[in-house]
Amino acid sequence: MEAFEYSPNPARVIFDNGTIKSLPDELKRLQLSKPIILSTPEQVNQAQDIEAILKAHVEIAGIFSNATMHTPVEVTETAVEFASSRGADSIVSIGGGSTIGLGKAISIRTGLYHLAIATTYAGSEMTPILGETANGQKTTRSEPKILPGTVIYDVDLTMSLPLWLTSVSGVNAIAHAVEALYARKRNPIIELIAQEGVRALASSLPEIISQPDSRSARSSALYGAWLCGICLGSVGMSLHHKLCHVLGGRFNLPHAQTHTIVLPHALAYNAPNVPGALEKLAKALPDSNGDAVKGLNILLGKLKVQRGLGELGMKESDVDVAADLALKNSYWNPRDLDRSRIRELIRRAWAGEDAR
Ligand code: NAD
């Protein structure tokens, strides 16, 4: 056995159908009595459901429903002002990475306790990482205090996740596990979690597409997303996450769709240097026959997701810009970053060609 370090993130997790009903007890346990509830405009109904569950037990500081992608600092400042003017003593965020990101941004500025209710598979609730946008620039920081203290996973809330978002958000989660398997600081626990996360998602996502009402498939997907989120929060990511960060930030491409398109290409790029990771990944992917890139391509085919960054609105002339940006700041990757190979990777992803 090789030497390793393992530092688990100390979040409390509650997982089942109907778990939002445990919210009053959770706040009572923490001796919190005046939460602010966060959501996007699209999920304000779910925020109101939370308010209805809580209002017999605690005073609600208010609902702030302007969470948006990339956590713009202006929105955070308005939300911080809203929370302090209403005397909030805690934050309940309900939504995907955008809403949970806002909860983290408020919490790190105010010290308010953050309880996150995750409704996509992005995994932000399991990480001490916060990405924020100011003046068109997205910056990322990581501190233990950013991690939400309690996370509620309620399968019922994911039943409304549109099928296209279910697919791309699920592959976004798989990407965390893939990069965890070849991370510099990988360890045997995270490898087990990564394989189980991929297995749970790769088997349940196609089932959700064919049977959207399948509660057991939705449950398995959310469980897999939790595990993949642990991977993202525990070990460093490399080429794939860096490329998606660059593409999303510079060309304003949608988060989960970009991850879905880039993943097989990033994996194929790193493949020659990480045979052990590929072997583990192949075992977790059905239909791979020992070939992880093939298994991933088959999964994406079943999910009928978009395969080209051009379809998301990126211009061909931006391929070179993206290649330059991808090499700009040095970061660890299992394979050296070669400008012409990285450019070719991005071009293939742009054109929607097969990864190789
Ligand atoms: P999102 O939070 O932007 O959600 C996308 C849309 O789906 C929103 O309109 C949302 O309201 C809606 N939605 C979410 N759950 C729903 C449900 N169950 N039913 C119906 N509609 C629902 O998307 P995302 O992919 O979860 O998050 C993306 C953002 O999160 C990006 O800004 C990304 O950078 C960030 N992120 C951060 C981390 C981290 O660790 N810091 C990790 C992953 C993602």
Image (cartoon, helix red, strand yellow):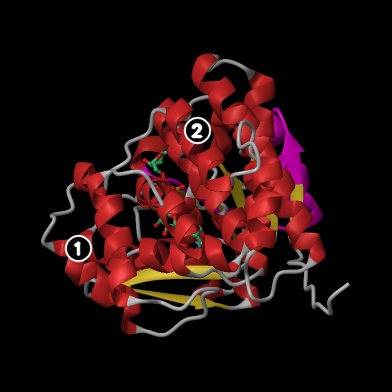
Tell me residue 41's x, y (percent).
Answer: 34, 41
Residue type, numbered disc 1 = Val
Asked if residue 137 shows in the view, the reply is no
Asked whether residue 132 is drawn in magenta, I would say no
Q: Which residues are magenta?
A: 14-40
The total number of labels drawn is: 2
On whether ligand 1 comes within 8 Å of the CB at mark 2, the answer is no
The disc at residue 298 is 2
Asked if residue 250 shows in the view, the reply is yes
Q: Residues within 10 Å of mark 2 (few under 14, many from 20)?
A: some
- Quadrant in which the N terminus appears: bottom right
Residue matched to label 1: 319
Identity of the residue drawn at 24% across and 51% down: 350
Is 321 left or right of 298, judged from the image as shown?
left
In-front residue for pair 246/144: 246
Within the image, what quadrant is residue 128 found in?
bottom right
Tell me residue 266's x, y (percent).
Answer: 44, 59
